[in-house]
Image: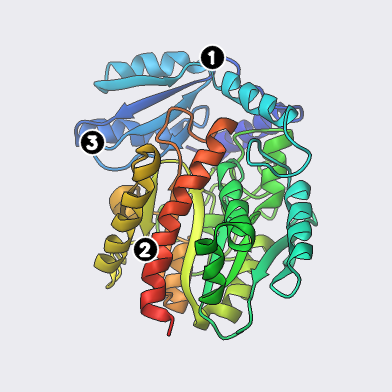
């Protein structure tokens, strides 16, 4: 797509989001390429038609691609149906899912109760409250501020020995992936106030947990555009804002699977670590990198347990170990509700994606265990997971998380 066309389209998009974006009669289709020719058709659509939004990007032959299509571009799918055999409607009306999600928030408790999605301020207030109840163990910290001046808040859980191995957990690096911050806050709650088996983890590890890594983007997805993915910076100038923070980390930056177009959802930023949220996180991770034995980044959706690298570096030497632990976690997760997770290398299961946080931790700090979890679901709801699935998602994740911690403790706790 020529730059001039991109600028025109970006201008129209900026005008459109001046008020809350509505997704009435937007549909999501699952398209599965059966051969290389069909895959190239989808790649062309992905790269040259910004009017449709890819929820799940083009991967290998045989792997599904999810495409959100506005009603005025329905003809694109009609034409695509003549070129690609496997086309199925997954979501009939995206706005109806958003409405159900919003209704859950209206009926929610004023404090976190894992039956609705909460604002950044509400999440941060809850972190302050639970830390106050557990003084001497829980401490609130800040990595700095976001582009729009929001606090990049984390909680550290340190019981007694400051030299214990460290586990880092972050979520909501992508704004529209709301289910992820509920998992992070659930983990905090369980470690501090849950069953004895969970609380006992504080005798083995020190935890640093950051439920809201991209607060500007998240709040914009709540107030204006539910499908917003990026930050809210404007370093590239023009009318298209933000960069993909999970394409903006230093290690492997701009080596494939990201875009140099500011309007793209995978815009890598004007330079590595250009986004203040990324720079602040990377600086803090540098300070704890030598002690960190497990790095976990929570995303959605697809129910995957992703292993570095997401670049042409391929699989890490400890890939088999990561697969062994990942399979054990997936088995534990499945027992409760029969929810199936699949472990594997990022490129094998998804696509090339350079500049990610997981690659950064593994590549620069040689973190022994590094996972990016893609949470529920597999596409029926996608990013707009209904509130009634929050608690089940948390419960089953915790089953798998305990198995992972068993394995990490066996290798790193004396």
How many residues crowd mark 2 within 10 Å: few (<14), some (14–19), many (20+)? many
> Which residue extends farthest left?
35
Q: Quadrant of residue 72?
A: top right
Front-most of 12 and 92?
92
Residue 312 visible at all: no
Q: Quadrant of residue 363?
A: bottom left
Image position of 119 with respect to 204: above or below:
above
Q: CA distance from mark 1 to mark 2?
A: 39 Å
* Secondary structure of residue under mark 1: helix
Q: Nearer the viewer, mark 3 or mark 1?
A: 3
Residue 376 coordinates in the image, percent (x, y): 45, 40
* Secondary structure of residue under mark 2: loop
Residue holding disc 2: 308
Front-most of 58 and 29?
29
Picture residue at 72% right of the left edge, 50% below the top: 123
Residue 62's disc is 3
Q: CA distance from mark 3 to mark 2?
A: 22 Å
Residue 96 coordinates in the image, percent (x, y): 59, 18
Q: In the visual, does 290 lie left or right of 161?
A: left
Q: Earlier in the sequence, mark 3 or mark 2?
A: 3
Residue 72's disc is 1
Q: Earlier in the sequence, mark 3 or mark 1?
A: 3
How many residues crowd mark 3 within 10 Å: few (<14), some (14–19), many (20+)? some
Residue 410's disc is none
Q: How is the image coloured?
A: rainbow
Picture residue at 48% right of the left edge, 26% below the top: 68
Q: In the visual, does 307 lie left or right of 181?
A: left
Image position of 96 with respect to 389: above or below:
above
Picture residue at 66% right of the left edge, 61% below the top: 277
Q: Nearer the viewer, mark 1 or mark 2?
A: 2
* Secondary structure of residue under mark 3: loop
């Amino acid at each position: 797509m020529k730059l001039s066309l991109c600028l025109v389209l970006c201008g129209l998009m900026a005008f459109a989001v001046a008020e809350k974006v509505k997704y009435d009669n937007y549909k999501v289709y699952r398209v599965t390429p059966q051969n290389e020719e069909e895959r190239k058709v989808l790649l062309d659509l992905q790269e040259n038609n910004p009017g449709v939004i890819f929820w799940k990007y083009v991967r290998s032959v045989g792997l599904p691609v999810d495409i959100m299509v506005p009603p005025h571009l329905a003809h694109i799918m009609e034409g695509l149906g003549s070129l690609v055999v496997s086309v199925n409607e997954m979501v009939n009306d995206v706005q109806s899912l958003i409405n159900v999600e919003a209704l859950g928030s209206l009926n929610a408790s004023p404090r976190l109760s894992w039956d609705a999605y909460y604002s950044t301020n509400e999440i941060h207030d809850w972190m302050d409250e639970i830390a106050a109840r557990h003084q001497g163990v829980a401490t609130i910290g800040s990595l700095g501020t976001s582009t729009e001046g929001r606090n990049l808040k984390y909680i550290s859980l340190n019981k007694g020995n400051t030299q214990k191995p460290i586990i880092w957990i972050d979520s909501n690096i992508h704004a529209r992936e709301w289910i992820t911050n509920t998992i992070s806050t659930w983990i905090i709650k369980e470690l501090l106030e849950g069953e004895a088996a969970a609380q006992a983890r504080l005798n083995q590890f020190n935890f640093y947990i950051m439920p809201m890594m991209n607060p500007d983007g998240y709040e914009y997805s709540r107030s204006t555009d539910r499908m917003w993915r990026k930050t809210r910076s404007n370093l590239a100038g023009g009318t298209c804002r933000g960069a993909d923070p999970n394409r903006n980390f230093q290690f492997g930056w701009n080596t494939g699977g990201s875009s140099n177009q500011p309007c793209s959802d995978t815009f890598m930023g004007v330079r590595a670590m250009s986004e203040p949220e990324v720079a602040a996180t990377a600086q803090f991770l540098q300070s704890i990198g030598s002690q960190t034995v497990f790095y976990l980044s929570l995303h959605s959706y697809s129910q995957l347990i992703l292993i570095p690298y997401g670049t042409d570096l391929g699989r890490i030497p400890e890939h088999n170990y990561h697969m062994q632990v990942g399979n054990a976690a997936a088995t534990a997760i499945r027992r409760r509700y029969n929810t199936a997770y699949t472990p594997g290398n990022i490129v094998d299961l998804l696509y090339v994606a350079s500049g990610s946080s997981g690659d950064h931790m593994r590549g620069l700090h040689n973190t022994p265990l590094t996972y990016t979890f893609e949470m529920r679901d597999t596409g029926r709801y996608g990013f707009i997971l209904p509130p009634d699935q929050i608690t089940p998602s948390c419960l089953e994740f915790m089953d798998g998380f305990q198995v992972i911690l068993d394995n990490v403790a066996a290798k790193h706790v004396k």
